Structures are given as structure tokens and as C-alpha cells.
Amino acid sequence: MEVKKYKYYAGGVWRDAENGRTFDDLEPYSGKVFAKIAAASKKDMQIAIDAAAKAYPAWAATTPAQRSELLFKAAAIIKRRRSEMAEILAKETGSTISFATFQQDLLAQSLELGAGWAYENKGEVLQTNVPGSFSIGVRRPLGVVASFTPWNGASILSWRTVISPIIAGNTVVVKPSEYAPISAGLMIAEIAEEAGFPPGVINVVTHAPGEAGELSDAIFEDSNVRVINLIGGIKTAKYLGERAGKTLKRTVFELGGYNPMIILNDVNVDDAVKAATFGSFFHQGQICMNTRKIIIQRKIYDEFLEKFIARTNALPFGDPENPTTIIGPLINQAAVDTVSERIKDAVSKGAKVQAGGFNEGLVYHPTILTDVPYDAIASNEETFGPLVIVEAVDTVEEAIAIANRTDYGLVSSIFTNDTYKGFELAPRILHGVVNVNSPTVNEETHAPMGGVKNSGWGRTGPHSLEDFTEMIWINSRSTPQQYPF
């Protein structure tokens, strides 16, 4: 079968890279070349930025109904292309076909809900001490948003960086991960074009591995780009944040998390095991919400661990396109190496491997570690793979202290038979999301998802409109003003 070639998309036109180069987009499971992708340059990125800047005034002036209609059309296209998009996602990123299909359903729902956010972009009437004055605050869009999209959960997360900016009246330039240029970017362009978005409102520029810096130069050098919108890792965020500070560009970052699950003595152990297995190993541990550490009271520790190991060892693994597969491949060899290195480091310092600890190609078997000391890398840093630590504690206070010792603060869970107690403890967990009696992997499109500390800032859903607009003060007088001179 001939390998399909993809161009990048700017100003409503599909374009070859100006240097004529392409790069190979590989399937993680088979290692085959899935597609040939345009390897854009700084000049190509500038073309996209210029197109977005040109489209911005007219797009900002559109009505909420006009913007909403286009999102509904995009949702309908995704529903129609559901199976096709899921297959592309599974091949390109190693996502299991069930998760890939789920993403298309959630994406369609997100676009339909996002269509309504156009009417949530509200101002306010302000009080004034000046007689004869009328004072209001009005929200307006910012301009061009540069969105950096990830390879994991590529369908839903890439569109997340687009929906809020455009519904608020901004235009967008998407720079997708080189590990998922189609699912995290070019599919957005295809759908936007078919839905009828005006040229330049949504642009997608792809690049070869290791060449993101050149495209970033164009983004930071252009004053039309007002917001850097990233879903990714801390290393990238620090790089982008430093450059954004020097150029006074706004940043919205959703980053990784070291997500704890606290399990108290009063729970149903079987229910807790199911939640822990799902939270730890969903999508091979390759999403920012995966459980990284399970903190469990000692009274039920032995029973929980025995059942958790058994359930983990029974998870089907292999080809992500097989409907029965739960554990598919990691994204690349570097990801496998990272998991292996973290496990070796922990074991060398006294940790015990209770399940997994080995790989077959890029498929890493789900791994459970116990007795992991705090000086092990896996105790402090997010390992983006199927690796979870289980730790026993005596008291609730100890569990909370351990949950809060990390520099991250994205999501967490508390499992207890006393729901009121869960709600009482939740505000003490220093994370942007605290789930009571549900796993760390838990999301609703309209909810304010986002992190604190090193997990970033900004929120999803209608709450995100503030991140992509600015409040201006409009003050009018109906009577002449008196001046001191």
C-alpha cells in the first residue's frame, strides 16, 4: 500500500514545506512508516502566522451564532468519520482502538458543548461613584493563539487547545507533536476545512523531530501572537515560558502530574482495585491524569496489593487495533527506556517489583513497585508509562502529607466509604482536581480541569474563556464632567 503524504495547512491552503522536505510518521506497534509529513520551516510557520493575523479581525467580529454553527458542523463531521479517525489514532499513536473510539465520541461532545460557550463570554456592569456615568467591563479576544498539542490523547487534547480560543474570537496556529502530526494537528485542519471555517482561522504547521525550535522562533518573534497555549511537559513549558516572558506573551499551560490515589481503611477493596488498575494503566500510563502513587492505609494494604497484582497481571496486551487489547505500545523506544531506567533506579535503592518490570518491543507490561524510597526518581518525577508505586501508611494525616510532597498538582483521588469525609479532606489535597471515590482519570468537558504548582495554570471548559480574552473597561457619561482646571 502506498504511504500517504500530508501537507501542512495555512490560510485555507494545503502547502508543501518551502524546502520540499518530509519526515516519516511511524506506527509505534509495527514500526512501519504510516505517513509522510511536511517538514515545515520557520518560513512556513510565518506564512501560517500571517494568515491567522489577517483572518483575525473578521473572525473576531463574527457573531456567537456564526462561530457556534461551525463547531456543530465540525462535530457532525467527526461523528461521520468516527471509525476512520479512531483507526488513524490507533495506528499513529498506539492508542487502543477502544480508547481511540472513545476519544472521537468525547471530541464530538466537546465541540457541541463548546459551541454554547460563545454565549458565556460575558462582561459585567460596574458600579461607579461618578453621577451620570455608566461603567461596563467587556471581554474581547486577544489575537493569534499558538497552540502546542501533544501526541497522547491526541484527538481530544489537540482540539482542546483550539475550541476555547476560536469560540472566544481568536485565530489559531497549531503546532502538533512530531509523534502524532496527523491526529494532533492535520485532522483538525481537514475537519476545519470541510466544516467551512474561514481561511486563516485554524492553521496547522508540522515539523520533523528535533526541529520545533525553528518554528518557535517565528512564533516568539511575531507580535501578532499573543498567547502560547501548551498541553505538554514541564521541560517544554519552562522553555516556552522563559521566551514568553521576554516577549510579554500570555501563557496557558496544562502540564503533567504526579497523581496520588489515597485509599482509606473503610473502602470496598475490590472497588478500589478496579479504580486503581484503570487509573494507573489506562492508555499505558501515557496520559497526564494517570495514577502514579497509591497511598493506602495499612489495615487493608495486604489484601489490596494481592488483588491489585492479580488484576494487573491479567490485563491483555499487544496490538492496539485488537479490540481486546488493554495495554498497547508506548509511543517510542525512548519512552520504553525511560520506564526501564526508572524501575532499575528504584530497585537499586531497595524497591520491589510486584508485577511487570519488563517489555516486549514497545509494549511495556504494567508494573507495580513497592518499598520505593523517596530518593528514587520514580518517587518524585512523572514516569509517562505503565508504572505505579504502592505505599502503606497508618494515618490519614500521613497520607495527605505524602500526596502533597510532590511538586506537581494536577489530579488526585480519595477513596472512602464516608463521602462527607472525602469532601472534607479534598480541599487539603493541593491539586487542581480532587476526585472522591472515582479514579484520577476522570474528566467532563464543561468542568474546570487544570493544575496547580508545576502542573501549570489555566482551566478548560467555559472557565478557559478568561485565558483567551482580556477585559476592557468602557466608561461613558451622560452629563458634562467638571474639571479642576
Image (spheres, grey):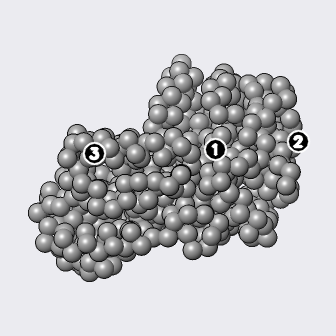
Q: What separation in Å lies between label 3 and label 2 (alpha carbons)?
A: 51 Å
237 or 480, nearer to the observer: 237
Q: Position of residue 94 (x, y in %)?
A: 60, 56
Could you tell me the amino acid type at mark 1?
Tyr
Quadrant of residue 84 within the rendered picture: bottom right
Q: Is residue 19 left or right of residue 245?
A: right
Residue that badge 3 annotates: 346
Q: Is residue 144 left or right of residue 395?
A: right
Q: Position of residue 484 (x, y in %)?
A: 50, 22
Sooner in the amino-acid sequence: mark 1 or mark 3: 1
Q: The C terminus lies in which quarter of the figure?
A: top right
Secondary structure under the numbered disc 3 in the rendered image = helix
> Which residue shows up at 57% across the image and 49% down it?
331
Could you tell me the amino acid type at mark 2?
Val
Secondary structure under the numbered disc 2 in the rendered image = strand
Secondary structure under the numbered disc 1 in the rendered image = loop
